[in-house]
Image (cartoon, rainbow, N blue to C red):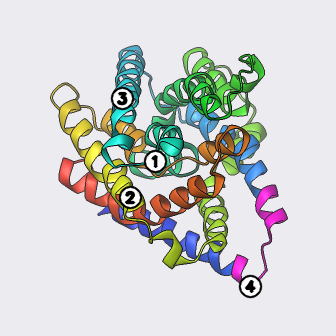
Amino acid sequence: MLLFQQMLALFIFLLIGYFMRKKQILDAKGSHAISWLIINIACPCMVIASALSGEDLSLQMFRDTFLLCLATYAALIAISLFLPALLGIPKENRNTYRLMTIFSNIGFMGYPLLSAMYGSGCLVYASISNVIYNILFYTFGIRTMQRDSNASEPLRLTNIVNPGTLACVVTLVMALARPPVPTFAEAVIKNLGALPASLAMIVIGSSLTEFRFSEIFSDWRDLAFSLAKLVIVPIVLITIAKRFVTDPVLLGILLVNCATPVGSLVVLAVQQYGTNERLAAKVVALTTVLSVVTIPIVAAVTGIR
């Protein structure tokens, strides 16, 4: 019930963003500015704030989270190799769908959801997933999309080292070392960290105005892909994981890693190397709208609370 209420709240924020963009209260430039604030300041602060919760940390939990995230992404990569072909996706678009299978919206939607479900302290462990996510995206993900453009740029460390991964590293160090933090600094970090839950969905809602709803739901392949990504794959992976994992926080991290909508980073990769940017943006919009319903369904079916 709590998860459904949280998704309903996120959906309301999404509608606010959609309304603001339709009424031209929020334009593209404003959305870009808010996105920059969320990605570079607010989300990193939300992760760092988890180290200020004062909760006792478990090295075993760190290890288990790391192993679970590695297994999750290995499974998603394996699924991405055959799912596009199984759905009859044209060959020129299959690499885009591979990335959309693997990389979900764990930053904009996943972190606020985890924080609401289990408290901000769980984000210390979720930050491990974020580090793996970024390394995988800027290595395997970019290389995959480069095949579509015959580009072959060298891997740049500056791509992997970004505010998100730096915040994760800082969080892990702070959680283990427990350095003293001035009260005013803690207040600033926690208040900034409270912004993504609402602002991120407002930005996502504003982006939906770029498509007619009839266009978003027009392609049966995209609907089939969304069903597979948002429902079938998460239920299968969580059901398998529950044979080995009992901790509810670990299962919650698995839920957001595989059941949240397609991540916006995929659109950025397609913009640079792919051939169908609008397709990627449309599937991001479609999975975002559907996830408001599918995430509670997956949680209910798999028994995640």
Q: Residues within 10 Å of mark 3 (few under 14, many from 20)?
A: many
Report the number of numbered marks: 4
Residue extending farthest bottom: 23
Q: Which residue is mark 4?
A: 23
Q: Is residue 145 above or below residue 101?
A: above
Mark 4: amino acid: Lys
Which residue is pictured at 73% across the width and 53% down the height?
Answer: 35
Point out the image quarter for the N terminus: bottom left
Q: Residue 70 location, x and y as percent?
A: 40, 21
Which residue is pictured at 65% across the width and 52% down the height?
Answer: 277
Q: What's the CA distance linking mark 1 and mark 3?
A: 26 Å
From the viewer's perspective, is the residue at label 3 or at label 2 nearer?
2
Examine the rendering and report whether any part of residue 49 can be seen.
Answer: yes
Q: Which residue is mark 3?
A: 72
From the viewer's perspective, is the residue at label 1 or at label 4 nearer?
1
Give the mark nearer the N terminus: 3 vs 4.
Answer: 4
Magenta extent: 21-33
Q: Which residue is mark 1?
A: 90
Q: Residue 81 location, x and y as percent?
A: 38, 31
